[in-house]
């Protein structure tokens, strides 16, 4: 599934200054060694995602135990920090079915937030596509799904997991980062104007409750956080040296290289350039913003781009500052075609430069939803430059695929790129 006021963003974005440098080519670089190190990096990235999710879980415990402005701010900051390593894992998704089949549990978007909690009147009361559009699990102890009554008297991880994609509607997102984001920030009601969601901490204060059902809201937030930690533990285990994902990708080096490049190309083109960026820019729609409640989108896009480059260079800086390097796809390509490797690294860095420019604008000028607003010529141009970089690097990724004789690889597409006129129909 693709869908799909920043607090201390510069401090939270641990990888903000990343630029990948050329690595020396080694003629003896072994495809098996490249794939093995790719799996090792995956393990490290999911470990970091788990560690930061556990820190978020502790911050949520503190908010629930003692609701306050300070504890809400701390939980929000922990969420932003948790997004950094996770977004850098997304390049592992498209080439590895075990990740793609799991991803919807933790990063599905956009979500119909009325399924989870109270919403502003501008949200509306019903949707032709979703009978659960305003079901409000937090306010209602019984939910009807397809005519069947579901007991929601106790909000547990099992309950919210069972309601994910209820009625086979993808927008019924009940778990993962974005459900937690909504519960920490609330709706962003500013459109393409300044400001993020502004949920008050008193939404969790049972003694001075706003929004109603503060006890159940706390139960939901804790359930979602518990599930996020459990899901990340599962995927971390899959990338451990004896885990299913690691063993699968390492079993056949050629298929392993295919997995690496499928992830790089699909995330570059269809997912990030297309669904997450070009679609919102075409529609000038703030609802097409990945981290839409927190206005953290520019950080998430940057870390996706860092992850794509990391898959090629085999470089990763862990959340504790440890730098990992090893046999890389870059070295493998350079061993036979130094010019192509130089081109690939140059394009990856050009995209990163554009993403950093977007990040800087996000921190100093305006949020991402403002950048994509209709009539914002300068903001639109900043986003389009990053999109152009992603499209350009995809062309070279395709050349790398050909140079390594990996055959035909199907990369993820996007209607917003392949048939933009259809977006408006």
Image (tube, helix red, strand yellow):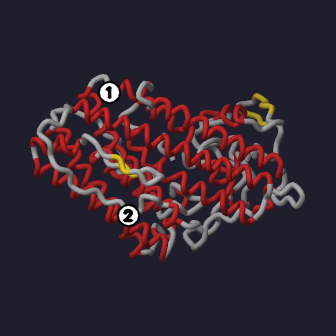
Asked which secondary structure carries label 2, the reply is loop
Asked if one can make out residue 391 in the rendered structure from this viewpoint, the answer is yes
Q: What number is the disc on residue 207?
A: none
Looking at the picture, tell me which residue is in the foreground, 348 or 141.
348
The quadrant where residue 388 appears: bottom left
Asked if one can make out residue 418 in the rendered structure from this viewpoint, the answer is no
**Rendered location of residue 177, percent (x, y):** 58, 48
**Rendered location of residue 313, percent (x, y):** 27, 48
Looking at the picture, tell me which residue is in the foreground, 288 or 95.
95
In the image, what residue occupies the spot 77% across and 31% down?
Answer: 150
Q: Is residue 425 above or below residue 9?
A: above
Query: Pointer 2: what residue?
Result: 17
Left or right position of 255 against 233: left
In the image, what residue occupies the spot 26% across and 36% down?
Answer: 34
In the image, what residue occupies the spot 45% across and 34% down?
Answer: 99
Left or right position of 256 against 211: left
In the image, what residue occupies the spot 10% across and 45% down?
Answer: 337
Left or right position of 117 against 243: right
Looking at the picture, tell me which residue is in the foreground, 184 or 31.
31
Asked which secondary structure carries label 1, the reply is helix
Q: Residues within 10 Å of mark 1 (few under 14, many from 20)?
A: many
Q: Is residue 174 above or below residue 204?
A: above
Q: How many marks?
A: 2
**Rendered location of residue 38, percent (x, y):** 33, 38
Q: Are marks 2 and 1 in contact (CB under 8 Å)?
A: no
Marks 2 and 1 sit apart, C-alpha to C-alpha, by 31 Å
**Rendered location of residue 10, percent (x, y):** 49, 67
Q: Residues within 10 Å of mark 2 (few under 14, many from 20)?
A: few
Query: Pointer 1: what residue?
Result: 250
The answer to which of marks 2 and 1 sits earlier in the sequence is: 2
Q: Is residue 374 above or below residue 393?
A: below
């Amino acid at each position: 599934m693709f869908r799909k006021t920043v607090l201390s963003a510069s401090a939270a974005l641990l990888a903000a200054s990343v630029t990948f440098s050329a690595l020396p080519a080694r003629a003896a670089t072994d495809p098996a060694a490249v794939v093995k190190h790719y799996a090792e990096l995956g393990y490290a990235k999911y470990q970091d995602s788990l560690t930061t999710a556990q820190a978020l879980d502790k911050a949520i415990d503190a908010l629930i135990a003692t609701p306050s402005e300070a504890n809400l701010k701390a939980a929000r900051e922990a969420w932003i920090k948790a997004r950094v390593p996770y977004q850098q894992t997304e390049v592992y998704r498209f080439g590895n079915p075990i990740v793609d089949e799991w991803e919807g549990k933790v990063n599905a978007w956009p979500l119909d937030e009325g399924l989870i909690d109270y919403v502003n009147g501008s949200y509306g009361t019903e949707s032709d596509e979703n009978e659960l559009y305003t079901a409000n699990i937090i306010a209602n102890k019984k939910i009807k799904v397809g005519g069947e009554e579901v007991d929601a008297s106790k909000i547990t991880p099992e309950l919210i997991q069972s309601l994910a994609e209820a009625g086979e509607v993808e927008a019924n997102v009940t778990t993962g980062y974005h459900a937690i984001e909504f519960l920490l920030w609330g709706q962003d009601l500013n459109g393409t104007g300044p400001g993020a969601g502004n949920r008050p901490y008193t939404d969790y204060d049972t003694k001075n409750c706003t929004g109603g059902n503060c006890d159940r809201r706390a139960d939901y937030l804790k359930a979602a956080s518990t599930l996020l930690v459990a899901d990340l533990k599962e995927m971390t285990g899959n990338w451990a040296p004896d885990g299913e994902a690691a063993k699968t990708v390492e079993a056949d080096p050629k298929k392993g290289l295919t997995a690496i490049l499928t992830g790089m190309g699909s995330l570059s083109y269809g997912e990030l350039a297309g669904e997450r960026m070009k679609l919102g820019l075409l529609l000038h729609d703030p609802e097409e913003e990945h981290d839409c409640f927190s206005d953290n989108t520019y950080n998430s896009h940057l870390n996706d781009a860092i992850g794509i480059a990391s898959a090629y260079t085999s470089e990763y800086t862990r959340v504790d500052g440890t730098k990992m390097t090893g046999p890389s796809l870059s070295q493998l390509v350079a061993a036979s075609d130094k010019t192509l490797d130089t081109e690939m690294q140059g394009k990856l860095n050009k995209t990163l430069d554009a993403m950093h420019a977007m990040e800087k604008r996000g921190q100093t000028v305006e949020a991402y939803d403002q950048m994509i607003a209709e009539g914002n010529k300068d903001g639109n141009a900043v986003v389009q430059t990053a999109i152009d970089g992603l499209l350009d690097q995809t062309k070279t990724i395709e050349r790398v695929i050909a140079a390594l004789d990996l055959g035909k690889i199907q990369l993820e597409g996007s209607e917003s790129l392949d048939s933009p006129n259809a977006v408006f129909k």
